[in-house]
Every structure is written in C-alpha cells, then in structure tokens.
Amino acid sequence: MGKKLRVKIYQLLDLNQLTMRGLSRKADIRYATLHALANQKRQNINFGHINRISDAMGITDVREIITFDDIVDNPFNEFGWNGERTAACSQECKRFLVHSQKDLHNGVITKGR
C-alpha cells in the first residue's frame, strides 16, 4: 500500500460555494488547469497554482488544499481490471463500487439509487 498526492479542488469549491469557473477567475488560473488538478490528471503540481488558490480562498494551511491518500488494491481485479484506486472516494464513486459489473452492464443501476 502506498500514498498518492491529491489536490482537493472539489472539496474546496463545495466549502466555499464556488464554481470551478469562479475559482479560475478569482485565482487567475486557466479552467483546464484547475480541471486537470481536480481530476488528478497532472503528474506535476505547480506551487504557483497552489499559492494562487490559497490566496483566492483565504487558505493559510496547505493541508487544506493537498492531501495524501492511501492506495488500496482495486476490488475489481476479478473482472480483469488492473490498477489502483484511492481510499478516499466520493459518494457517487461509492454507489458505483457496491454494484457488480454485470448489474452496471444490464442497466440495473439507475440514477439516484
């Protein structure tokens, strides 16, 4: 089990009742850059961006922006999926993880369930 760095953009947006576009304007960071940070698509983090996000949101502790998550084995290896997932998971992700791949393929899972 290892660790994975995560930028907590979505949690910050929820806490501050702000949209990604609003943060983009406030912090003077491109929307696409924020989106990539929020979705863990970046291999490198620009600390200038972290500074701008903290200034825009009035954050003084970097731990409110960045965290380390434990990496656990993927529970879907029995279905042939390989890889990792982080231990911290959104509610939507948890809803998805409790259902089998067969249920998802057959349309058994409906929105809002």
Image: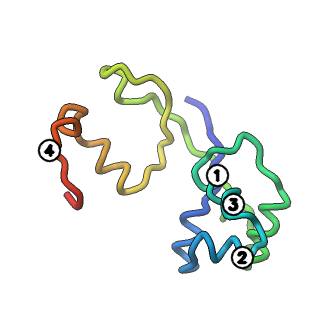
Q: Are marks 2 and 3 in contact (CB under 8 Å)?
A: no
| Mark 1–mark 3 distance (CA, rounded to whole Å) | 19 Å
**Residue at position x 73%, y 63% in the image:** 30
Circle 2 sits in a helix, a strand or a loop, which is it? helix
Q: Quadrant of residue 58?
A: bottom right
| Mark 2–mark 1 distance (CA, rounded to whole Å) | 16 Å
Amino acid type of the residue tagged 3 in the rendering: Arg
> Does residue 31 appear to the left or right of 75 in the view shown?
right
Position in image of residue 38 (x %, y %): 60, 56
Q: Nearer the viewer, residue 5 or 24?
A: 24
| Label whose residue precedes the other's in the sequence (2 or 3) | 2
Position in image of residue 100 (x %, y %): 22, 35
Which mark is drawn over residue 108? Answer: 4
Position in image of residue 27 (x %, y %): 76, 73
Q: Which residue is mark 2?
A: 25
Q: Nearer the viewer, mark 1 or mark 3?
A: 1
Is 71 located above or below residue 28 in the figure?
Answer: above
| Mark 1–mark 4 distance (CA, rounded to whole Å) | 31 Å
Amino acid type of the residue tagged 4 in the rendering: Val
Q: Which residue is mark 3?
A: 63
| Mark 2–mark 3 distance (CA, rounded to whole Å) | 23 Å
| Mark 4–mark 2 distance (CA, rounded to whole Å) | 41 Å
| Label whose residue precedes the other's in the sequence (1 or 3) | 1
| Label whose residue precedes the other's in the sequence (2 or 1) | 2
Amino acid type of the residue tagged 2 in the rendering: Arg
**Residue at position x 77%, y 62% in the image:** 50
Q: Nearer the viewer, residue 23 or 16?
A: 23
Task: Answer few, some or many: residues within 10 Å of disc 3's Cα (few below 14, many 20 plus, some between 14 and 19).
Answer: few
| Mark 3–mark 4 distance (CA, rounded to whole Å) | 40 Å
Circle 1 sits in a helix, a strand or a loop, which is it? helix
**Residue at position x 45%, y 28% in the image:** 73
Task: Answer few, some or many: residues within 10 Å of disc 2's Cα (few below 14, many 20 plus, some between 14 and 19).
Answer: few
